[in-house]
């Protein structure tokens, strides 16, 4: 989330993500211009090299294959297979890594039933590999369908599946209350999309306050809580809360950050004995992901432009 002054810029960047000329330009030149700071690469091989290095540095990994809004069944099936193959690979290589996927990548826009079948296959493979997986949260129009898939899998006995709640959404507090009885594993984020004020808080202060409320409620309930933010103040608040309540450093919660963002903070947390997982994305469909990272911190646009100028144009 950004401050009030940044908001028009953020809206512009997210709107530009839908512009085909911008998409063409960034898709051709973006990786060279700096997208590689946020994305492990375009292939599973690129990703695995980063995952091994990151594990070696003391971080767990959440793998994300870049893709969303899949328009055909074959694409959704391919993504399902690729996630399943990754899980197998993690087991063979004994990597400290799980997967986090977008249900629209696995076919939600085609049919909720197809998405459920595909997600179930990944969940089954994760269970076979003694591993976990998580459903990322996308735009607010997908929240009901995503949580419904989560609920179905939990009631079918998949205890290895987690979900995500976004603190910018008004509904998240009641979603959390409804899902805690399932013995949940929840990642709390602020939210990366442009949402209208009817559904989402618009002020950073409100988003942050709701973030802390969700984290604390989840910790108190005993749900496994993934505190996914680069916001140092909220991280310290969560640590202080856990200490006050006698919640141990391991087994009840972890911190999560995005690959390429706030690395010094992530390293300090590992040095203090906390579990930290980096979300490491890869794949050739990196354009919307990059645009969301730029919108979160418009200074990142300057980082890309600086690279462009240094190369004398692209
Ligand atoms: C592991 C993980 C998983 C996520 N999954 C989802 C999801 O499923 N659905 C969803 O909607 N969102 C997801 N997000 C994104 C999230 O919603 C926010 O958009 C993002 O984390 C930025 O918010 P923040 O919590 O870091 O706080 P902010 O208040 O935005 O940022 C705090 C500080 O972090 C640094 N920072 C933040 N973002 C960047 C950046 N892009 N580049 C450089 N510095 C930055 C800045 O120093 C900033 O001052 C995820 C984030 C993480 C870390």
Image (spheres, rainbow, N blue to C red):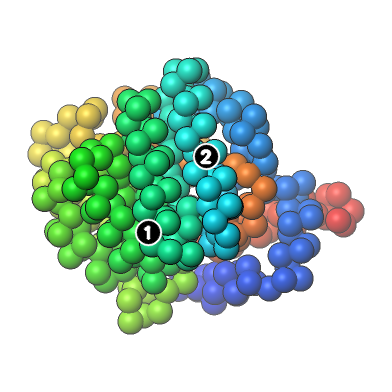
Rendered-image quadrant of the C terminus:
bottom right
When asked about the image quadrant of residue 44, the answer is top right
Return the residue at label 1: 113
Identify which residue is drawn at 36% across, 80% down: 197
Q: Residues within 10 Å of mark 1 (few under 14, many from 20)?
A: few
Rendered-image quadrant of the N terminus:
bottom left
Given residues 161 and 31, the one toward you in this image is 161
Identify which residue is drawn at 54% across, 56% down: 73
Q: Secondary structure at mark 2?
A: helix
Query: Height in image: 280 above or below 194?
Result: above
Gap in Å between the C-alphas at discs 2 and 1?
Answer: 17 Å
Measured as percent of width and height from the top left, residue 9 is found at 58, 72
Q: Is residue 165 visible?
A: no
Return the residue at label 2: 81
Query: Height in image: 2 above or below 237?
Result: below
Measured as percent of width and height from the top left, residue 295 is found at 55, 63
Relative placement, left or right, of 182 versus 233 is left
């Amino acid at each position: 989330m950004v401050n009030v002054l940044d908001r028009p810029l953020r809206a512009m960047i997210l709107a530009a993500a839908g512009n085909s000329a911008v998409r063409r330009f960034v898709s051709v030149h973006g990786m060279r211009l700096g997208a590689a700071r946020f994305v492990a690469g375009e292939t599973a091989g690129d990703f695995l090299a980063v995952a091994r290095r990151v594990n070696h540095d003391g971080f767990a990994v959440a793998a994300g294959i870049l893709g969303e809004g899949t328009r055909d069944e074959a694409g959704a099936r391919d993504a399902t297979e690729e996630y399943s193959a990754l899980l197998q690979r993690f087991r063979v290589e004994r990597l400290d890594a799980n997967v986090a996927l977008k249900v629209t990548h696995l076919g939600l826009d085609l049919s909720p039933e197809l998405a459920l079948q595909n997600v179930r296959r990944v969940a089954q493979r994760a269970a076979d590999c003694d591993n976990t997986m998580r459903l990322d949260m996308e735009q607010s129009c997908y929240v009901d369908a995503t949580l419904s898939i989560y609920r179905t899998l939990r009631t079918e006995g998949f205890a290895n599946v987690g979900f995500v709640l976004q603190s910018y959404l008004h509904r998240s507090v009641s979603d959390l209350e409804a899902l805690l009885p399932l013995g949940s594993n929840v990642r709390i984020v602020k939210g990366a999309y442009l949402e209208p004020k009817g559904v989402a808080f618009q002020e950073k202060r409100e988003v942050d306050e709701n973030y802390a409320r969700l984290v604390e409620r989840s910790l108190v309930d005993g749900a496994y809580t993934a505190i996914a933010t680069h916001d140092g103040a909220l991280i310290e608040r969560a640590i202080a809360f856990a200490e006050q309540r006698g919640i141990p450093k391991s087994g009840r919660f972890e911190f999560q950050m995005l690959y390429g963002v706030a690395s010094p903070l992530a390293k300090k947390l590992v040095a203090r004995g906390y579990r930290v997982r980096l979300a490491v994305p890869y794949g050739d469909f990196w354009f919307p992901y990059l645009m969301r990272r730029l919108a979160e911190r418009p200074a990142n646009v300057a980082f890309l432009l600086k690279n462009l100028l240094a190369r004398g144009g692209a």
